[in-house]
Image (cartoon, helix red, strand yellow):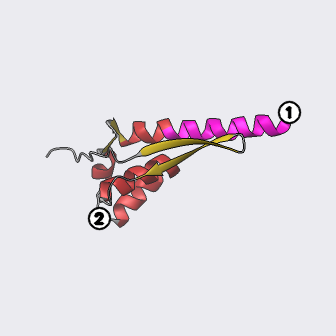
Amino acid sequence: MKPLVALTGALVVIASPAFGSTSMKFVAANQSIESQVCVVAAQQGVEAATATGSELGLSKSEVRNLVCNGRLLTSFSRKYQRLQAAQVSDKADDSGS
């Protein structure tokens, strides 16, 4: 069985300097189940993506084998979770100075 591949040129990360901060916005290029799961993975992590995939009819292994923007879902999610954590940390540092 081939791994389920989501060609999600789907997610666009937009950085916009608003009030001195940078925010990320994830946008699905289409309304496919795979794109929706990739967006959730970027915003909320792998466990939330697995739950969303299950609600939308995907098995856990199908979710874990998704490819989002050329990366396995777990790697893709980890990348954006780190970026979001860094943003929160930067905001905390800025408010403390």
Q: Mark 2, mark 1: which one is toward the viewer?
A: 1
Locate residue 2: give its quadrant: top left
Residue at 38% across / 57% down in the picture?
36
Q: Residues within 10 Å of mark 2 (few under 14, many from 20)?
A: few
Where residue 53 sits in the image (x, y, percent)?
35, 59
Q: Is residue 18 magenta?
A: no
Where residue 47 sits in the image (x, y, percent)?
46, 52
| Residue with the mark numbered 2 | 57
Q: Residues within 10 Å of mark 1 (few under 14, many from 20)?
A: few
Residue type indicated by callout 1 = Ser
Query: Mark 1: which secondary structure?
Result: loop
Question: In the image, 91: left or right of 53?
Answer: right
Q: Is residue 90 magenta?
A: yes
Where residue 39 sits in the image (x, y, percent)?
43, 52
Q: Which region shows up in magenta?
A: 80-97
Residue at 33% across / 65% down in the picture?
56
Locate residue 40: give its quadrant: bottom left
| Residue with the mark numbered 1 | 97
Is the C terminus in the top left, top right, bottom left or bottom right quadrant? Answer: top right
Please tell me which residue lies in front, 75 or 11: 11
Residue at 32% across / 51% down in the picture?
63
Question: In the image, 54: left or right of 41?
Answer: left
Q: How many marks?
A: 2
Question: In the image, 45: left or right of 90?
Answer: left
Asked if one can make out residue 46 in the rendered structure from this viewpoint, the answer is: no
Q: Residue furthest left?
A: 1
